Image (spheres, helix red, strand yellow):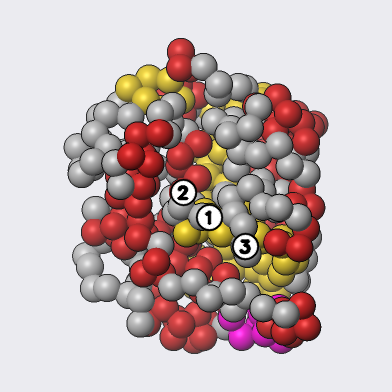
Amino acid sequence: MKRREFLKATSLGALASIFSLSGLKKAMASTSTPTAVTSKKNSLVAVMGGTPPEMFEKAIASLGGMEKYIKKGQKVVIKPNIAWDKTPDLAANTNPELVGAVVKKCLAAGAKEVVVFDHTCDNWKSSYAHSGIEKAATAAGARVVPADLESYYQEVTLPKAKNLKNPKIHKALIDCDVWINMPILKNHGGAKMSISMKNFMGIVWDREYFHSNDLQQCIADITTWEKRPVLNIIDAYRIMFQNGPRGKSEGDTAVIKSLIISSDMVAADTAAISLFNKVKTMSIDMVGHIKKAESLGVGTTDLKKLNITQLKM
């Protein structure tokens, strides 16, 4: 895509059409598969046009406030994408300002403590520092912990999984009361897209198993873990639309000032692909783990089953 065409595609008017309620549902109609996944109607909020903290503030208020998801005295884990030793302008990791804003909201809602971690691909100390997330999270009141040793993980059983039966998951998640999943929207060479479900690969110890035993199925399998995130907050302020997951330069990124939030990670990722597709073509069928997770009862790609709210700053 030429730069001039790209800027046209990501203009405010174009983004407004992406997030219109009828437009979003229509865009997903061809990718939806009938399935009895949930017994209650979840909500999905899409916000555009502000800074990451501003958009989150508006989104969480629309959902009834953070107090709806975080109760007083709870131990909370926030799992951003901090995989790469990259600065925020390269969109390899979750926006640090957004992470800080979510930490503050959790503590304001009465959380006993908030822990932030990721099993990074690059050196964890460098990734935590250069992403800006360690500084933002600690400044907001969170405790940032490492994930680079196998001793930090504990084996769990996934009864619904097809390939990934007994992964080791970080003990911070096993010990917490609730957790929040905070991916960034970006292209991924192997998984095709890295969003909410792909972000689960940062909670496990042995990622090599994923790559040698059907990556797409293993991603779907790990999301069947019974302790699912209470919220999936997709950072789409600056996205990486090519050369993911690490990226090569700022030319791989686009500022589209958007955010998607839902308790249903399948629906959230479905909506996120609809957004991504306006920048660079990506079929949901290419991102195999989404429908595989749907078939395992994790969530739904049928956005008509959700209460969708579109907000503009």
Q: Which residue is mark 1?
A: 188
**Residue type, numbered disc 1:** His
Q: In this rendering, does residue 223 appear at all?
A: no
Tell me if mark 1 has few (under 14), some (14-19) or many (20+) residues whose alpha carbon lies within 10 angstroms of its own.
many
Q: Give the secondary structure at mark 2.
A: helix
**Residue at 59% from the left image edge and 78% from the top image edge:** 278
Q: Which residue is mark 3?
A: 242
Q: Quadrant of residue 110?
A: top right
Query: Which of marks 2 and 3 precedes in the sequence?
Result: 2
Q: In this rendering, does residue 21 appear at all?
A: yes
Q: Quadrant of the N terminus?
A: bottom right
Q: Quadrant of residue 267?
A: bottom left
**Gap between marks 1 and 3, in whole Å?**
8 Å
Name the disc covering residue 198, or none: 2
Q: Is residue 247 above or below residue 177?
A: below
**Residue type, numbered disc 2:** Lys
**Gap between marks 1 and 2, in whole Å?**
9 Å
Q: Position of residue 68 (x, y in %)?
A: 52, 48
Query: Which of marks 3 and 1 precedes in the sequence?
Result: 1
Q: Quadrant of the C terminus?
A: bottom right
Range of magenta residues: 10-18
Tell me if mark 3 has few (under 14), some (14-19) or many (20+) residues whose alpha carbon lies within 10 angstroms of its own.
many
**Residue type, numbered disc 3:** Gln
Q: Position of residue 221 (x, y in %)?
A: 30, 44
Q: Is residue 199 magenta?
A: no
